[in-house]
Image (cartoon, rainbow, N blue to C red):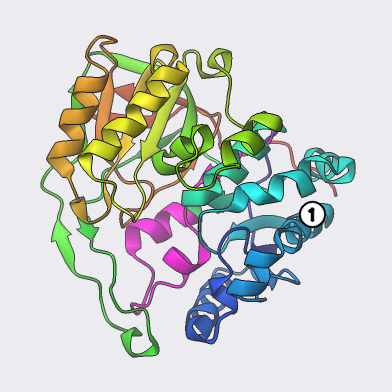
Amino acid sequence: MIKPTMLKKGDSVAIVSLSSGILGEKSAHHQLKLGIKRLRQMGLKPICMPNALSGLKELHDNPEKRAADLKTAFANPKIKGIICVIGGDDTYRLLPYLLEDANFIESVKRNPKIFTGFSDTTINHLMLYRLGLATFYGPNLLSDLAELDKAMLPYTRTAFTQYFHNPTTTQIQSSPIWYEERTDFSLNAIGTPRISHIEKDGYQVLRGKGHLTGKLLGGCLDSLYDCLTQNRYVDEATVIKKYQIFPTNEEWKNKVLFIETSEEKPNPDLYEQMLLTLKKQGVLENVAGIIVGKPQNNAFFEEYKAKLLAVTADLKTPIMYNVNFGHAFPRTVIPYGAMVDIDLDQSKIKITEPFFDTEMKSM
């Protein structure tokens, strides 16, 4: 895998809308200002790509404009990081415009840079993984940098600042607090805290002993399911297959699968169907183990556990549950392709290699 270099103060970062175009709506203007302000406070120079603020309809109707922004960001060697605005449900529509462009593919390899986001962004991550770039399933602009409280959620901010450091190993701690998703994102909500709860469960080992090791690969379970079905769009699975976005069984072999559920909070029966689809595909029998993100708002917390154990019972898959990544608040960073060591006896997670290239390159 090609690793980008870490961020430093003064670096330019691109803001891209690869899924939903919500950032361009008037209703999100206060969040845009807040996200930009927070990035500047960290010493970064945020640059909205030309189409990032075009709005919902324009970006929905013109996926090529979304793709153009990602091309622009990768082609510019002065841009050191790419921050996704938010998820959505149709970023797969960008694939033809990106993967049929040899210049884009060359740009990704010549100008590796930090790429962060989650949810539907899973598809972008898997595309870049296919091209050999190590990316980060982590904070995005609207959900995290534009947090409406007086500051970013402390755990998430600490996670984001990992993009400025490059230790040899990184311990991923369980957050002592979890937060509910907001119901009001309006201007009136600025300065108001989220409803918070003490984390009573922490990391839960559902099965397994000793150490689970392997390279990390996965994403949003809903998105992985959509890759393989006609659940959301009739052509999505066809497009994913054409461009070989979903990893092969050989690629899943001995990986540590990370999965988490979306804000749609799939009911337990659908959750089971999603897992069974991964099983039928051969994913579950090939991976070394699974880490599972905390469900947003703790929805179906016990039911999901039961389904996980039932679907993997014959495989005896090691599983660690309730990890702070994905749609639940707060969230950490999961680096694609990085080696992880999970201590199933002590409920600890450690990334055992640097996130970034240790050799600074002159661009």
* Camera-side residue of 224 and 69: 224
What's the amino acid at mark 1? Answer: Lys
- Circle 1 packing at 10 Å, graded few (<14), some (14-19), many (20+), is many
**Quadrant of residue 358 within the rendered picture:** top right
Residue 123 in sight: yes
Q: Horizontal and vertical percent for residue 273? A: 32, 31
Instruction: Give above or below for 126 relative to 280.
Output: below
Q: Circle 1 is placed at which residue position?
A: 71
Query: Which residue is at 41% across, 56% downward?
Result: 158
Instruction: Give above or below for 313 relative to 307.
Output: above
Query: Which residue is at 35% across, 85% downward?
Result: 190
**Quadrant of residue 166 within the rendered picture:** top right
Query: Which residue is at 27% across, 53% downward?
Result: 296
Residue 345 in sight: no
As helix, strand or loop, the secondary structure at mark 1 comes to: helix
Magenta residues, start to end: 133-160
Instruction: Give above or below for 184 relative to 83.
Output: below
Residue 135 forms part of the magenta stretch: yes
Q: Horizontal and vertical percent for residue 209? A: 22, 14
Residue 260 forms part of the magenta stretch: no
Query: Which residue is at 23% across, 45% downward?
Result: 267
Check the image and name the residue furthest to the bottom.
188
Check the image and name the residue furthest to the right.
103
- Residue 23 placement, left or right of 3: left
Q: Horizontal and vertical percent for residue 61? A: 67, 66
